[in-house]
Image (tube, rainbow, N blue to C red):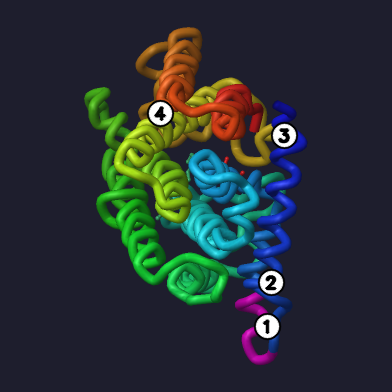
Amino acid sequence: MEIQKYLSEQKERVETALKHYIPAPVVPFTRHIESMRYSVFAGGKRIRPILCLAAAETIRAKGEIGDSLLPVACALECIHTYSLIHDDLPAMDNDELRRGKPTNHVLYGEAEAILAGDGLLTLAFELITTDDGQGLSAVQRLDIAQIIARAAGSFGMVGGQFLDIANENSQYPFEMLQMIHRRKTGALITASVQAGAIAAGACADDSRALSVYGDEIGLAFQIVDDLLNATSTTEKLGKAAGSDETMGKATYPGYFGIDETRKKAQEATARAKEALCTYGENAEPLRSLAEYLFKRTY
Ligand code: GRG
């Protein structure tokens, strides 16, 4: 399938919806909304919302899903953006560049950046739980809110970030690295796929297959991120290359070297595709997405 065409079409759908949900700033909240919009529209790939939509399409045909899942897809992007804004803060990774642009706190100040993140995280749950009459039942919205809250919270992304910071500059076993990766990055990616599955009315077998797919691409995603950090340039990545080494972070290349690390990402990608073996044409977007994430260059 033509993955680039698929990605740009889905990206446009998500961005149109995001503009609707985070409209132009209004007095007296102008600067707050501006700072949220700055990071939301700074050029992200929209991987998590696209995974969510593609997972739903795997189980039910595209037409049937329609736009009912767009609030959930946008909520995932809001949570992702909040995590990047907070991750870039001086108290965390202290980064000044993200997607080739100044980070939120560099432009708006620390307090504004914290509030932009808080606003986006909160908006995400408003979007998921609001009944917009587009088709998701109250039970589905509740299930999706719970899955995403768990993945974003203290035993998911926040917990992974905690472990990452707590273990900086220390030699820890590979199992700890896996735990950090699974939680910090993998959990929200898996939840994006699971949310799509719930919205499409997945049966137990569908949920299991898509969860395995989500876990494996989440792992591959973070391994590739480690690889790019170690081998690419700041110009290509739009964020500081080599920062993992500077900050004394454990990474896959640190444990296995570059070639073995690439092999591990490829194996996780293959396992993700294998999890979809019982699905036909409808799963083509998810298969192509797995391959695209493995081959990404930024
Ligand atoms: C602050 C609670 C809190 C969590 C931060 C996501 C995260 C946890 C830290 C980001 C550090 C990092 C670079 C992790 C690698 C994986 C990752 C999330 C990369 C960026 O995701 P992409 O490539 O970003 O989807 P775009 O720019 O396309 O949106």
- For mark 3, what is the residue? 235
- Closer to the camera in the image, 248 or 76: 76
What residue do we see at 65% from left, 44% from top? 45
Q: How crowded is mark 3: few (under 14 residues within 10 Å), some or many (20 or more)?
A: few
5 displayed left or right of 108: right
Give the SS element for disc 2.
helix
Of badges 1 and 2, nearer the viewer stands 2
Observer-side mark, 2 or 3, equals: 2
The span from disc 1 to disc 2 (Cα, nearest Å) is: 16 Å
> Is 274 displayed left or right of 228 in the figure?
left
Pick the residue in front: 145 or 28. Answer: 145
Q: What residue type is labelled 4?
A: Glu
Going from N to C along the chain, the mark reached first, 1 or 3, is 1
Q: Which of marks 1 and 4 is in front?
A: 4
Residue tagged by mark 2?
20
Magenta span of residues: 27-34
Q: Do residues under tags 4 and 3 come within 8 Å of each other at their CB atoms?
A: no
- Count of marks, rendered view: 4
Q: Which of 269 and 137 is in front in this view?
A: 137
Task: Name the amino acid type tagged 1.
Answer: Thr
The C terminus appears in which quarter of the rendering? Answer: top right
- Residue 273 appears in the rendering: yes
Residue that carries the numbered disc 1 in the rendered image: 30
Residue position for label 4: 216
Bin the neighbour count of mark 4 within 10 Å (Cα to Cα): few under 14, some 14-19, many 20 and up: many
- Amino acid under label 2? His
Check if residue 33 falls in the magenta segment. yes
Question: CB atoms at circles 2 and 3 under 8 Å apart?
Answer: no
